[in-house]
């Protein structure tokens, strides 16, 4: 099944106390790998960043996610990190 997530996280490269909102999906893909798709929302009508990644480890792992971030609109010159 696809799990839909919505939440808030804190911190940025500029200000550790900035609150940001995110939404996305989590799903299992081949070989029990877990794929994350997150969108960082800067304002209710504007998505700023998107992330596609794969969780390191199995279900419930605290190892983190390996993936890439880029601009939500995929415009020329957007960074890829």
Image (spheres, rainbow, N blue to C red):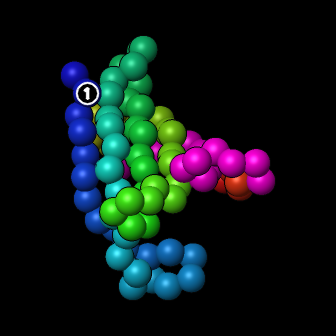
In-image side of 80 versus 23 (left or right): right
Residue 39 falls within the magenta-colored stretch: no
Q: Is residue 48 above or below residue 28?
A: below
Q: Position of residue 3 (x, y in %)?
A: 23, 34
Residue 55 sits in which quadrant? top left
Q: Residue at x 50, y 75 (%)?
A: 12
Q: Position of residue 67 (x, y in %)?
A: 56, 42
Between 32 and 19, the one nearer to me in the picture: 19
Q: Kindly give the residue lying farthest to the front in the view shown.
A: 45
Residue 4 sits in which quadrant? top left
Q: Residue at x 25, y 52 (%)?
A: 6
Q: Residue at x 32, y 28 (%)?
A: 27
Q: Residues within 10 Å of mark 1 (few under 14, many from 20)?
A: few
Q: Which residues are magenta?
A: 62-77
In the picture of the structure, the residue carrying the numbered disc 1 is 2
Q: Is residue 16 above or below residue 25?
A: below
Q: Position of residue 75 (x, y in %)?
A: 69, 48
Q: Quadrant of the N terminus?
A: top left
Whether residue 31 is visible, yes or no, is yes
In-image side of 48 versus 81 (left or right): left
Q: Residue at x 42, y 14 (%)?
A: 30
Q: Position of residue 15 (x, y in %)?
A: 50, 85
């Amino acid at each position: 099944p696809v799990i839909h997530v919505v939440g808030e996280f804190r911190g940025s490269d500029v200000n550790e106390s900035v609150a940001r909102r995110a939404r996305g999906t989590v799903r299992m893909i081949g070989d029990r790998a877990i794929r994350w798709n997150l969108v960082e929302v800067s304002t209710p009508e504007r998505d700023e960043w998107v992330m596609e990644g794969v969780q390191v480890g199995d279900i419930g792992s605290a190892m983190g996610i390996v993936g890439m971030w880029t601009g939500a609109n995929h415009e020329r010159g957007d960074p890829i990190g």
